[in-house]
Every structure is written in structure tokens, then in C-alpha cells.
């Protein structure tokens, strides 16, 4: 998909799923004009999540030095969350303010570390966003968070485990996985980035 508007620079981020051993991570490059909503969509697509659940960013606001939450404003609970579709990443991220936390699924609590690695000139002929590297597969949705995922992998490794067949059946019913689930698999050429503007219309309609 095409990048967002006119831009001269791209931000290179490393996204790491916290607690995963060996590490599960992605390296992506996105336009400097991206909002946090756009970044959210790029993270979902690069990691392999399906955007089924709520999410939230937390980082330092460089203008105040205070921690801020950026995501979908929660009117029900009155939380002070800044609207992600109105916050530009270049307003917050710089080489002096490089880190953020990204929480996906408030139930399973998938915590990601976001690290700005570089700010680069836009490369001619490249369609952004792009995933340039990564390691290991994204965990299945709704498997119980990082500890539930570790339990799932242990069950899959043991054909004699009483839940082995049940877990295989559960994964096979999930059409997202084409064939057997391989926790070590990741291929940048299989990443498909969706249009964040179209996703925004669906999310906030």
C-alpha cells in the first residue's frame, strides 16, 4: 500500500514482544507523517495480530516530560487517553525520546517494547510501511498471554500430553494458520500491510 501523504523521512522501529524467549520481534519502517493509529495498524500487520482487541500506547511526552497514554479515548471510565488518530508520531518520537510501550489485548496483556532505531531519508522506489526483518511467529490470539503461549508450546512439543490433540484441533480450526502452526516461522515477504484509513473508518464507525 502507498505511504501517507508527502514525507521525506521514515522512522525505523524495532517491535519486541516482552517476555517471549527466544525473542519475537519485528523491524519496520514507516512514514514520519504517521499517526499513532497508523503505527498501531502497522504493528498489528507486521507482528501478525488480527486487531480483535483494545490497545494502548504509553510513552513520555517530550514537551512536558510526563507519561501519556495514547489510544481510543475511554468515555465510560473517564481515563485521560489521547486520541491516537490525532497524535503524530513525529511529535513524540525522536532520537532523544526513542522508547514507548504498546499494550494489545487488555485481557491477555501482550506487552510490546517499541524502540526508535533510526530516522532515515525516504528511499526512492520503496513503498512504505515495510517490514525489513523479524524473528519467530506471532502467538495465536486468545491463548492466554505470554504464559499461556508458553504452556501451549509445551503441550505442542509433547505428543503424549493429555491436551495435545485438543490444542492441535483448536489451531487447525483457525483458518489464519495455513497448515501446522510453526512458532519459529517468520518471513518478511508474507507481511501484508493494510490501509490504516480504511481500518480507521471501520473501527470508529
Image: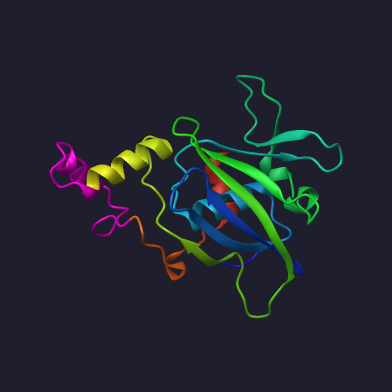
Residue 14 belongs to the span the image colors magenta: no
Q: Is residue 188 left or right of residue 12?
A: left
Q: Residue at x 69, y 37 (%)?
A: 83
Query: Considering the image in quadrants, where does the C terminus appear?
Result: top right
Query: Considering the image in quadrants, where does the N terminus appear?
Result: bottom right
Which residue ends up furthest to the bottom in the rendered image?
125
Q: Main secondary structure of the magenta part?
A: loop
Q: Is residue 147 left or right of residue 166?
A: right
Q: Is residue 101 above or below residue 25?
A: above
Residues 181 and 150: in front is: 150
Residue 35, horizontal then vertical, whole percent: 69, 50
Q: Is residue 44 above or below residue 125?
A: above
Snapshot quadrant of residue 163: top left
Colour style of the rendered protein structure: rainbow
Q: Is residue 95 left or right of residue 47?
A: right
Residue 42, horizontal then vertical, whole percent: 56, 55
Q: Residue at x 42, y 39 (%)?
A: 146
User: What is the magenta range?
Assistant: 157-182
Residue 45, horizontal then vertical, whole percent: 49, 55
Which residue ends up furthest to the top in the rendered image?
77
Snapshot quadrant of residue 145: top left
Which residue ends up furthest to the right in the rendered image?
63
Q: Is residue 92 left or right of residue 124?
A: right
Q: Residue at x 44, y 47 (%)?
A: 50
Amino acid at each position: 500500500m502507498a505511504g501517507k501523504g508527502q514525507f521525506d523521512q521514515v522512522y525505523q522501529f524495532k517491535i519486541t514482544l516482552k517476555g517471549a524467549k527466544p525473542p519475537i520481534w519485528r523491524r519496520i519502517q514507516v512514514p514520519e507523517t504517521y499517526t499513532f493509529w497508523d503505527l498501531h495498524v502497522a504493528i498489528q500487520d507486521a507482528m501478525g495480530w488480527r486487531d480483535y482487541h483494545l490497545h494502548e500506547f504509553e510513552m513520555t511526552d517530550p514537551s512536558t516530560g510526563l507519561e501519556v497514554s495514547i489510544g481510543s479515548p475511554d468515555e465510560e471510565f473517564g481515563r485521560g487517553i489521547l486520541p491516537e488518530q490525532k497524535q503524530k508520531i513525529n511529535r513524540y518520537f525522536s532520537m532523544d525520546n526513542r522508547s514507548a510501550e504498546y499494550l494489545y489485548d487488555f485481557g491477555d496483556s501482550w506487552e510490546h517494547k517499541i524502540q526508535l532505531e533510526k530516522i532515515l531519508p525516504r528511499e526512492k522506489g520503496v513503498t512504505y510501511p515495510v517490514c525489513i526483518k523479524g524473528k519467530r511467529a506471532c502467538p495465536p490470539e486468545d491463548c492466554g498471554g505470554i504464559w499461556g503461549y508458553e504452556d501451549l508450546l509445551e503441550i505442542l512439543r509433547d505428543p503424549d500430553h493429555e491436551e495435545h490433540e485438543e490444542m492441535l484441533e483448536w489451531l487447525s480450526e483457525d483458518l489464519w494458520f495455513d497448515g501446522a502452526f510453526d512458532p519459529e516461522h517468520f518471513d518478511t515477504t508474507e507481511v501484508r500491510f493494510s490501509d490504516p484509513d480504511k481500518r480507521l473508518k471501520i473501527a470508529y464507525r
